[in-house]
């Protein structure tokens, strides 16, 4: 079951005099998708790290399903939140099945124990993400799109209620980007994701959070937030916008400012 997310007055920095994100507050309704966009260095990944419990905030709260994640045991958080970071292939010769099965670790009594439930959930995820034929292949030998499918499958077998993704389409070609976006649309979860591509963001998001210099400069539905004016303020580029002929969502082309 999906959960809501509440972020209130969140601040983080490597030391008290240097804040990377400042006074971040927003809500993510249960079952919705929020896309975070902004220029490089805007604070997107830093924000996510405080939400999935890598960086402890210096101020503020992150509530997931009404619970403060920084007051919860790490094992409980790992059953609540799954994370997919920018793809990095492991150095070891894990098979695709082994990579996907890693998502069951929060439910095991020991690192090497496996239950019939774990096996069934892993098998189903391999089928759902069309990876069954790759199950015994080395993960490192997969294409970029196949690796992202495997990492998404690993996240799903955690049975999370919130999934956090940092640039899941990075380094993928157009077809694989669209496949990942389609997979995210079909997840019955709350989704929080950063994207560079504003056209993909507009296609996927229920709401868009636009960041600049560690702060929120716009928050709301794509039609309201992804405007030429906001894009100019956040990215220092000129944007021309029309509507997608099938979905009616914003669609953009870009140029340098004159």
Image: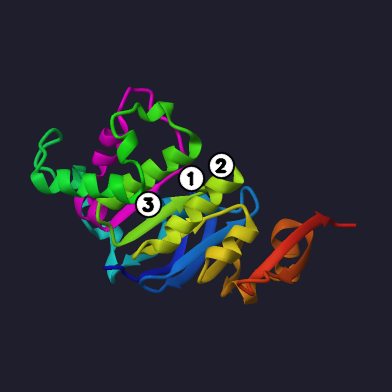
Label 3, label 2: how far apart the Cα atoms are: 31 Å
The location of residue 215, given as percent across then percent down, is: 58, 62
Name the residue carrying label 3: 56
Identify the residue at image location x=41%, y=44%.
149
Q: Which of the colour schemes (rainbow, by chain, secondary structure, one colour) is used?
A: rainbow
Q: Quadrant of residue 114?
A: top left
The numbered disc on residue 14 is: 1
Residue 12 part of the magenta segment = no
Mark yes or no: residue 57 visible: no
| Magenta segment | 74-103
In the image, residue 9 above or below residue 13: below
* Residue 1 visible in the picture: yes
The disc, 2 or 1, on the residue closer to the chain's N-terminal end is: 1
Element marked by disc 2: loop
Say if the magenta span includes residue 95. Answer: yes
SS of the residue at dot 1?
Answer: loop
**Circle 3 SS class:** loop
The residue that disc 2 covers is 172
Residue at the spot 59% in from the left edge and 58% down from the top edge: 200
Q: Nearer the viewer, residue 88 or 12?
A: 88
Task: Locate the C terminus by quadrant.
Answer: bottom right
Q: Is residue 178 above or below residue 105?
A: below
Q: Residue lying furthest right in this view?
A: 258
Q: Which one is nearer the viewer's eye here, 67 or 16?
A: 67
Q: Position of residue 65 (x, y in %)?
A: 29, 69
Label 3 or label 2, whichever comes before in sequence order: 3
Q: Residues within 10 Å of mark 3 (few under 14, many from 20)?
A: some
The N terminus lies in which quarter of the figure?
bottom left
In the image, taking residue 189 as reference, residue 214 lies left or right, namely right
Q: Mark 3–mark 2 contact, CB under 8 Å?
A: no
Res 136 quadrant in image? top left
Measure the alpha-carbon separation of dots 3 and 1.
10 Å
């Amino acid at each position: 079951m999906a959960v809501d997310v509440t972020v209130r007055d969140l601040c983080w920095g490597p030391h008290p005099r240097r804040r990377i994100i400042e006074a971040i507050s927003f809500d993510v309704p249960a079952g919705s998708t929020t896309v975070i966009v902004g220029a490089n260095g805007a604070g997107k990944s830093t924000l996510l790290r405080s939400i999935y419990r890598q960086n402890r905030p210096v101020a503020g709260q992150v509530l997931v399903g009404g619970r403060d994640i920084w007051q919860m045991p790490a094992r409980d958080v790992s059953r609540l939140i799954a994370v997919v970071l920018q793809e990095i292939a492991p150095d070891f010769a894990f098979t695709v099945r082994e990579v996907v099965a890693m998502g069951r670790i929060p439910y095991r009594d020991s690192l090497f124990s496996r239950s019939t439930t774990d096996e069934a959930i892993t098998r189903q995820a391999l089928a759902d993400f069309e990876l069954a034929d790759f199950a015994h292949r080395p993960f490192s030998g997969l294409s970029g799109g196949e690796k992202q499918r495997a990492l998404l499958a690993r996240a799903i077998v955690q049975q999370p209620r919130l999934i956090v993704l940092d640039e899941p389409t990075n380094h993928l070609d157009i077809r694989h980007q669209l496949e990942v976006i389609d997979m995210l649309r079909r997840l019955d979860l709350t989704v929080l994701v950063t994207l560079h591509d504003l056209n993909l963001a507009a296609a996927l998001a229920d709401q868009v959070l636009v960041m600049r210099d560690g702060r929120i400069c716009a928050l709301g539905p794509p039609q309201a937030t992804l405007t030429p004016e906001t894009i100019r303020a956040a990215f220092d580029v000129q944007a021309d916008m029309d509507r997608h002929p099938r979905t009616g969502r914003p669609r953009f082309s870009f140029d340098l400012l004159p």
